[in-house]
């Protein structure tokens, strides 16, 4: 008989947001809190919550949990993931946030069903792995690591929808973002980007792009006429002008441009009929230019201070 101490039901809707799982079925599952108990009951364990239990590794024994669909091992001191994790054919959600990972086993990329992966707040400085093998990955967080670049293979994950690269040391992004037909949001804020690949701006499915706190001097004139972009944040950079193609963004609602070097916006900025908020704090915008913008964008809230 399974001990009631080994399994406990969790109402995941009451957990902290960073631990919430999006899959409705998993939210209704029982979750095992004890790794030793889980390993001794592989026929029944579907979820494993090892949050903040002092683990320094995910051992080989975890590979025997053949029914496992999700792991939450955030806020430990994990620096080693045993290659046996690649045996978990049903694994769909992995949360390894706030550990001490410096590398991943190659077998990690055998997890064909993995749809959500959180590697935020670790010590990864390179991720040159075969990301294209993760055929089901939709959500990926790599925030707050030590990354300096993102491999091109990451733009071959055809189901990718949301990716967070923020708070790293990234100097270059790959060129193939236009291939990602389901991509909805990219956060590359707080990095060291001096340029943005045209393919990222040309992606038609992208709805939210965050580029705050980088070193951007210019944006490529590459926004697509059929863009879905609703939120574009580029504050705290060094932009002196915006590309004319930004006026193609027929669905844009929020444009954040604080603390750049902009003195004027494109002549056709009035085409942005859906723009609700334009943030221009900290730019050397003249009174005449501000009046022109207000006339062109009468329905837009323009924030200058």
Image (spheres, grey):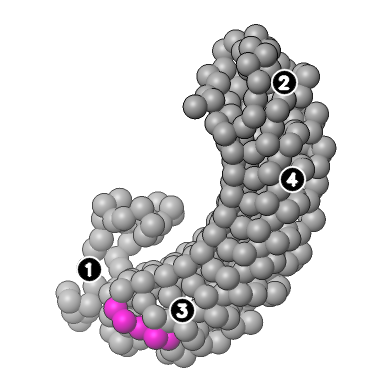
- Among numbered discs 3 and 4, the one appearing first in the sequence: 3
For label 1, count other residues whose C-alpha is less than 10 Å away and answer few (under 14), some (14-19) or many (20+): few
The secondary structure that most of the magenta stretch takes on is loop
- What is the CA distance from the residue labelled 2 to the residue labelled 4? 20 Å
Determine the CA span between mark 3 and mark 4.
Answer: 34 Å
Q: Which residue is mark 4?
A: 217
Examine the image and state in which quarter residue 106 appears.
Answer: bottom right
First in residue order: circle 2 vs circle 4: 4
Q: Residue 160's spot in the image, x, y percent?
A: 63, 54
Q: Which residue is mark 1?
A: 8
Q: Which segment did they paint magenta?
A: 53-57
Residue 161 percent location from the top left of the image: 61, 50
- Residue 205 visible? The answer is no
* Residue tagged 3: 100
Label located before the other in sequence (1 or 3): 1
Closest to the camera, between mark 1 and mark 3, is 3
Decide which of tag 1 and tag 2 comes sooner along the chain.
Answer: 1
């Amino acid at each position: 008989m399974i001990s009631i101490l080994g399994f406990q039901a969790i109402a995941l809707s009451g957990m902290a947001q960073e631990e919430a799982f999006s899959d409705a079925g998993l939210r209704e599952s029982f979750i095992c809190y004890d790794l030793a108990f889980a390993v001794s009951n592989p026929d029944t364990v579907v979820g494993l919550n090892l949050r903040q239990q002092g683990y320094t590794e995910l051992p080989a024994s975890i590979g025997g949990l053949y029914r496992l669909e999700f792991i939450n091992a955030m806020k430990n001191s994990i620096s080693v993931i045993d290659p046996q994790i690649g045996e978990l054919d049903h694994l769909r959600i992995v949360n390894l946030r706030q550990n001490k990972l410096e590398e991943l086993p190659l077998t990690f990329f055998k997890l064909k069903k993995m749809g959500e992966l959180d590697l935020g707040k670790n010590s990864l400085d390179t991720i040159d792995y075969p990301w294209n093998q993760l055929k089901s990955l939709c959500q990926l967080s790599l925030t707050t690591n030590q990354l300096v670049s993102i491999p091109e293979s990451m733009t071959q994950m055809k189901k990718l929808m949301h990716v967070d690269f923020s708070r790293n040391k990234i100097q270059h992004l790959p060129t193939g973002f236009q291939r990602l037909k389901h991509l909805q949001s990219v956060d590359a804020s707080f990095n060291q980007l001096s340029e943005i690949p045209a393919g990222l701006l040309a992606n038609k499915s992208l709805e939210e792009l965050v580029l705050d706190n980088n070193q951007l001097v210019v944006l490529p004139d590459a926004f697509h006429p059929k863009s879905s972009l609703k939120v574009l944040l580029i504050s705290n950079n060094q932009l002196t002008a915006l590309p004319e193609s930004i006026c193609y963004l027929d669905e844009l609602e929020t444009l954040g441009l604080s603390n750049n070097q902009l003195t004027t916006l494109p002549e056709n900025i009035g085409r942005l009929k859906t723009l609700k908020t334009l943030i221009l704090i900290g730019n050397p915008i003249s009174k005449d230019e501000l009046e022109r913008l207000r006339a062109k964008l009468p329905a837009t809230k323009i924030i200058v201070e």
